[in-house]
Amino acid sequence: MLKFFHRMASPKYFYQFAGKLIPWLGVACLGFMLAGLYDGLLVAPTDYQQGDSYRIMFVHVPAAWMSLFIYMVMATAGAIGLIWHIKLAEVMAISSAHVGASFTFLALVTGSIWGKPMWGAWWVWDARLTSELILLFLYLGVIALYNAVEDKRTAARATSILALVGVVNIPIIHYSVEWWNTLHQGPTVTKFDAPSIDLRMLIPLLLMAVAFKLFYAVVVLMRARCEILQRERNSGWVKELVRASS
Amino acid sequence: MSEFFHMGGYAFYVWMSYGIALVVLLGNLLSPILLKKRLLRELARREQRSRRP
């Protein structure tokens, strides 16, 4: 096991291993997503209050969960990169930023589309929505900062610090619906009690959540491979790879 | 079937959400694929230039 981790720290092995892993993760992701879509759109019953509009939940909630999860992965990887100077951790951190930003955007937009028929407004400045918007700006800030610095090792250090500072926003987002009087509803799944949601709605939600996690894994590995190619462009194995592909 | 697409009167909101989700997911997949292609092309060009005397 230790040998495995040691080898994975080498960019070349990671590049090859990720390349082998991606198709399997992709197939699993597609399976979960199709099952979740079928279950969520066709099997799950209509909500007695919200009608069929609640089905937006099956993309909105997984996207919102992932926006927080990916941020924590990014900040943790950034911290590991800062402390132990592991290049691969830096690569994983910056590769997560783009996916995280897109999921945050998706959570905000689908939430807005859900809000219009249910609340009568596309947007309100309540604590949950505002703190999630700040999360999007944090992601965009991380990406912009990374691109602004020429030397990628320095850029990774700077962005890791920014990402770590931004972690303060994560509990604010999570608890915003409890700390403040928000229009956004409270949690029905991620709490210490039993989930207060019908099982027939919970199952597709969880299927979609797993699908989104697998999707993130696929995309972050694809991005990490690109980042490694760029950083290792002067090493022998990348040159060989370039020669073989052209 | 048409009832399914009608979504109890919320068709516009529901399908718009799923449509945007699809676009975001496809964009996420496409961007590293294009990036890798561009990178390999760039690196190949650099390699050729460095080999020229």
Image (cartoon, coloured by chain):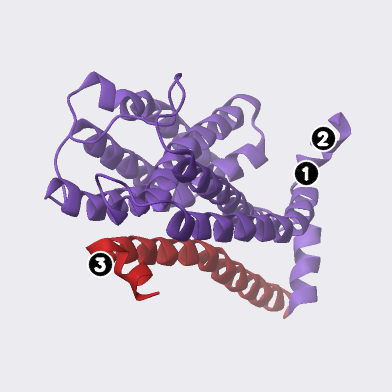
Q: SS of the residue at dot 1?
A: loop
Camera sees residue A241: yes
Residue beneath label 3, please? B12
Q: Give the label, 2 or 3, closer to the camera.
A: 3
Q: Quadrant of the C terminus of chain A?
A: bottom right
Q: Give the residue type that dot 2 points to.
A: His
Instruction: Give me the C-alpha separation between circle 1 and circle 3.
Output: 49 Å
Instruction: Give me the C-alpha separation between circle 2 and circle 3.
Output: 51 Å
Callouts 1 and 3 on one subunit: no
Tag 1 near tag 3, CB within 8 Å: no
Q: Residues within 10 Å of mark 2 (few under 14, many from 20)?
A: few
Q: Quadrant of the N terminus of chain A?
A: top right
Residue A27 in percent (x, y) is at: 68, 60
Residue beneath label 2, please? A6
Tag 1 near tag 2, CB within 8 Å: yes
Residue beneath label 1, please? A10
Q: Chain for mark 3?
A: B
Name which residue lies at 32% across and 50% down.
A54
Q: Residues within 10 Å of mark 3 (few under 14, many from 20)?
A: few
Residue A137 in percent (x, y) is at: 30, 43
Q: Give the residue type that dot 1 points to.
A: Ser
Chain A shade in the render: purple
In front: B50, or A159?
Answer: A159
Q: SS of the residue at dot 3?
A: helix
Callouts 1 and 2 on one subunit: yes
Residue A7 as seen in the image, left or right of residue A160: right
Colour-to-chain, red = B
Q: Residues within 10 Å of mark 1 (few under 14, many from 20)?
A: few
